[in-house]
Image: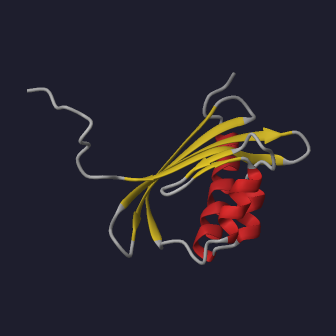
Amino acid sequence: MQIDDPAVIAEARAVFDRYERAIAENDTAVLDDSFWADPRTVRFGTTEILYGIDAIRAFRAGVARYAPRAIRRVHITSFGRDFACTHLEYQRTDSGLIGRETKIMVRLPDIGWKVVSAHVSLLAGADPGRVQKA
């Protein structure tokens, strides 16, 4: 299995870029199409925990707009021809908050690249549950 095949990385980046444009434009049709239409699809957001495409679509339908953001860093890794992970570090331009987004993508027969799992979070301040070593 080849890791980080340049052609696969380019394909994953194209899916990533399409999704980023859709976030900026709140293009719900593209956002929904980016995800695998299956009850096993998962999306954890900054305020929501969504299991299944129906829950993801219902969430998207209620979003008036997304906070504007500027990309700080994109990291993509591929494993073989049909599996890739994208990692985004961004900054919300309205609040300055730092966010992170991970997408697990799979190339599925007859439908192409789809996000099967996504996790979005905002960088918090200090973690009260983590005790620092003295």
Provide residue 41's location: percent of width, then percent of height.
71, 44
State the residue lying farthest toward the left. 134
Q: Is residue 72 above or below residue 117?
A: below
91 left or right, relative to 11: left
For residue 91, what is the image quadrant?
A: bottom left
Give me the residue at 69% from left, 72% from top.
27
Q: Position of residue 17 (x, y in %)?
A: 62, 60
Total number of numbered discs in the rendering: 0
Residue drawn 32% across and 68% down? 96
Q: Residue at 70% x, 48% y: name it.
A: 11
Q: Is residue 58 above or below residue 42?
A: below
Q: Colour scheme used in the picture?
A: secondary structure
Relative to 85, say whether 121 is above or below.
below
Q: Nearer the viewer, residue 59 or 28?
A: 59
Farthest residue, direction right: 110
Q: Furthest residue to the top? A: 1
Residue 16 position, x and y percent, is 63, 55
In-image side of 48 versus 116 (left or right): left
Res 57 quadrant in image: bottom right
**Which quarter of the rendered picture does the N terminus lie within?**
top right
Give the image location of residue 18, x and y in percent.
67, 63
If the image is split into quadrants, where does the C terminus sit? top left
Most foreground residue, 11 or 38: 38
Q: In front here: 9 or 50?
A: 50
